Image: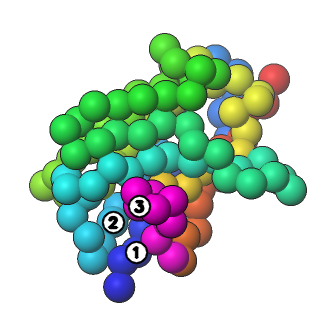
């Protein structure tokens, strides 16, 4: 069974940094496109950053230049380095793999809460 466990969230002041980790089991991340998603209360999860099997990364416009996604294949873990955090980055962050058919791996992990104070 595939599992994702996100960690590294917390409370930080605006302008601060956090590094999120997503440890995966049951699937080799190096062979897959994996994304970080965030969810605001009452909203759907939205893609924040993605890294593909060729280590090409992409970001939503609002985090470009501030966030960086990376992967450690030896640990089967993907990271999201978040710098210059803003209050609007406050959300629960998740990682997952989206298939070419638009399906995600279920169940989602527990997510990690990021709270940025102004």
The residue beneath circle 3 is 99
Image quarter in which the C terminus is found: top right
Q: Residue at x 19, y 38 (%)?
A: 54
Q: Which residue is mark 2?
A: 24
Q: In screen coordinates, is 78 left or right of 55?
A: right
Q: Which residue is nearer to you in this view: 82 or 41?
A: 41
Q: Secondary structure at mark 2?
A: strand
Residue 117 position within the rendered picture, expressed as x and y whole percent measured from the top left: 78, 30
Secondary-structure class at tag 1: strand
Q: Position of residue 45 (x, y in %)?
A: 67, 52
Mark 1 or mark 3, which has the lower sequence index? Answer: 1
Question: Residue 116, relative to residue 15: is it above or below?
Answer: below
Quick one: which residue is furthest to the front in this view? 101
Under tag 3, what secondary structure? loop
In the image: residue 68, left or right of residue 107: left
| Segment colored magenta | 96-106
Tell me if I can see residue 10 in this picture.
no
Q: Nearer the viewer, residue 59 or 98?
A: 98
């Amino acid at each position: 069974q595939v599992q994702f466990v996100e960690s590294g969230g917390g409370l930080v002041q605006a302008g601060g940094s956090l590094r999120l980790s997503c440890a995966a089991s049951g699937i080799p991340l190096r062979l897959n496109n994996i994304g970080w998603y965030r969810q605001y209360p009452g909203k759907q999860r939205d893609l924040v950053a993605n890294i593909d099997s060729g280590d090409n990364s992409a970001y939503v416009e609002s985090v470009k230049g501030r966030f960086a996604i990376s992967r450690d294949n030896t640990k089967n873990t993907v990271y999201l380095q978040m710098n210059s955090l803003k209050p609007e980055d406050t959300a629960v962050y998740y990682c997952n793999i989206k298939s070419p058919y638009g399906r995600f791996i279920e169940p989602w992990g527990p997510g990690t809460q990021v709270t940025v104070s102004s």
